[in-house]
């Protein structure tokens, strides 16, 4: 094992110059970061940008770990993505929501023994037209997220209709150079058709509404320099379940992209009321590696 | 009462922000050649272009495209072009950009590589971030000509 590691390390060192060139040619931070649903974007909102740094003659990939801790819940996300020619992005993500305080509500109110909810998300995003940096009209992409809730007992008990669902979205992103105090401003707008409750963690559809509805999501970020991006996101949400109202999400984020290989994102998130527990606020941290 | 206080604080913050942004904006509306000056005038731009050339030569993604070119002429023309675009007293005397790149079939990968090298060359010459951004903004209209779109 040790010998094999040494050989691997030696080979790695030999190919480092080549590997550095191979990471992809797009300009720093133009791959966004990995959202909680695996698609490239910010923290909560997918952007028109495709993950990694692959340009039009290149392949690229990302792996990411994220964790959000709000008052009564914590969400862990692992994600990975591939990008072909900066044209097509394929992603997978797995979410685990620890129910923490909700465990007691579920046990006392519903007689349910459940301490976490798991969901898998398979995503695809295609860049339709434009380049976020170079096109005057920005970059436009369309994407789908197929979501599969793996612990449907709880969502079902509170009125969700289905354990899987598909979100479809169209997204536009544009970087305005030297826009605010000579700094570059990134603007994103996403329209998503969805019937997911709390992103799908509480299932799909419900007693109040069972069809796809159009939700608007947006974010703005200012590049302080090419390594630091600060901004805010807003994500409108459906409200399908009579059991508890669902609020829109928002966050304030800071992303640090020291080079193309690494991105670190921290955010203050506000998820509003989630499954009867009010005003869920907390911190989000995400690490992303690109290759 | 608490709510009124919060609104008062918020509006005070907003006013401060407005003043701050307004203040910075008035600093930025100096004479048109301030970008040219921030780049270090023609000499500073010539240094950036020289470092850019070193980066290009070592960059496997694009050095093939520059094979056989007249380095001195390229250096002079690009320096003049950036000088003119930044509001300096120069005139670009090279060929028209679309015509110049028509047969080169430049890909997005290659365009990105050149943009990256330009940014690195500006960083090597301590060009402030704001000036870098402003110069790139001036260069954006050249994208469709260079890519032959």
Image: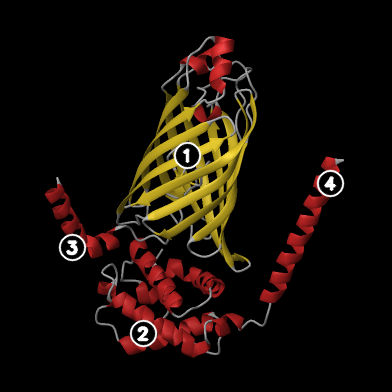
Q: How many marks?
A: 4
- Say which of marks 2 and 4 sits in front: 4
Question: In x, y percent, where is residue B89?
Answer: 55, 90
Circles 1 and 3, Cβ within 8 Å, touching? The answer is no
Task: Give the quadrant of residue A118.
Answer: top left
Q: Name the residue under label 1.
A: A67
* Residue B144 in the figure: left or right of residue A217: left
Give the labeled residue for mark 4: B5
Secondary element at tag 3: helix
Mark 3 and mark 2: Cα distance apart in space: 34 Å
Q: Spatial distance from mark 3 to mark 4, Cα to Cα? A: 63 Å
The subunit carrying tag 1 is A
Q: State which quarter of the image contains the C terminus of chain B.
A: bottom left
| Mark 2 on the same chain as mark 4 | yes
Residue that protrudes farthest toward the left in the picture: A3
Q: Residues within 10 Å of mark 3 (few under 14, many from 20)?
A: few
Q: Picture coordinates of residue A138 (x, y %)? A: 51, 55
Label 2, label 4: how many angstroms apart (C-alpha)?
63 Å
Q: The residue tagged with tag 2: helix, strand or loop?
A: helix
Task: State the residue position of label 2.
Answer: B74
Q: For the view shown, which residue lies furthest in the right direction? A: B1
Query: Marks 1/2: CA distance?
Result: 50 Å
How crowded pointer 1 is (Cα within 10 Å; few <14, some 14-19, many 20+) is rated as many
- Residue with the mark numbered 3: A14
């Amino acid at each position: 094992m040790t010998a094999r590691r040494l050989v691997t390390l030696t080979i790695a060192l030999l190919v480092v110059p080549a590997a550095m060139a191979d990471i992809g040619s797009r300009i720093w931070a133009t791959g966004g970061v990995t959202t909680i649903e695996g698609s490239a974007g910010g923290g909560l909102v997918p952007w028109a940008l495709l993950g990694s740094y692959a340009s039009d003659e290149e392949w690229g990939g990302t792996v990411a770990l994220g964790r959000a801790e709000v008052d009564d819940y914590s969400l862990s996300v692992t994600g990975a993505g591939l990008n072909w020619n900066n044209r097509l992005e394929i992603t997978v993500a797995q979410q685990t929501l620890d129910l923490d305080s909700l465990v007691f509500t579920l046990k006392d109110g519903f007689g349910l023994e459940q301490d976490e909810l798991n969901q898998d998300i398979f995503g695809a995003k295609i860049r339709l037209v434009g380049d976020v940096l170079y096109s005057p009209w920005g970059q436009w992409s369309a994407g789908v997220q197929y979501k599969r809730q793996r612990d449907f007992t709880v969502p079902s008990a509170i009125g969700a209709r289905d354990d899987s669902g598909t979100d479809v979205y169209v997204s536009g992103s544009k970087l305005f150079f030297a826009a605010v105090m000579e700094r570059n401003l990134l603007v994103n707008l996403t329209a998503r058709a969805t019937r997911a409750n709390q992103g799908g963690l509480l299932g799909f559809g419900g007693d109040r509404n069972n069809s796809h509805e159009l939700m608007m999501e947006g974010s703005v970020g200012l590049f302080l320099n090419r390594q630091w991006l600060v901004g805010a996101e807003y994500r409108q949400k459906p409200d399908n379940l009579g059991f508890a109202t669902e609020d829109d999400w928002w966050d304030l984020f800071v992303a640090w992209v020291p080079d193309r290989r690494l991105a670190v994102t921290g955010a203050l998130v506000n998820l509003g009321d989630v499954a009867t527990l009010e005003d869920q606020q907390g911190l989000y941290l995400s690490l992303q590696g690109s290759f | 009462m608490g709510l009124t206080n919060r609104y008062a604080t918020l509006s005070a913050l907003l006013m401060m922000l407005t003043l701050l942004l307004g203040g910075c904006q008035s600093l930025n509306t100096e004479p048109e050649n301030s970008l040219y000056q921030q780049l270090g005038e023609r000499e500073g731009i010539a240094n950036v272009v020289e470092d850019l050339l070193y980066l290009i030569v070592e960059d496997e993604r694009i050095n093939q495209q520059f094979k056989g070119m007249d380095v001195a002429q390229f250096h002079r023309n690009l320096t003049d072009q950036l000088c003119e675009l930044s509001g300096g007293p120069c005139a670009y005397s090279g060929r028209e950009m679309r015509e110049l790149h028509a047969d080169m079939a430049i890909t997005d990968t290659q365009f990105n590589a050149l943009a990256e090298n330009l940014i690195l060359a500006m960083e090597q010459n301590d060009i402030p971030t704001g000036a870098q951004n402003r110069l790139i903004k001036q260069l954006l209209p050249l994208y469709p000509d260079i890519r032959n779109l």
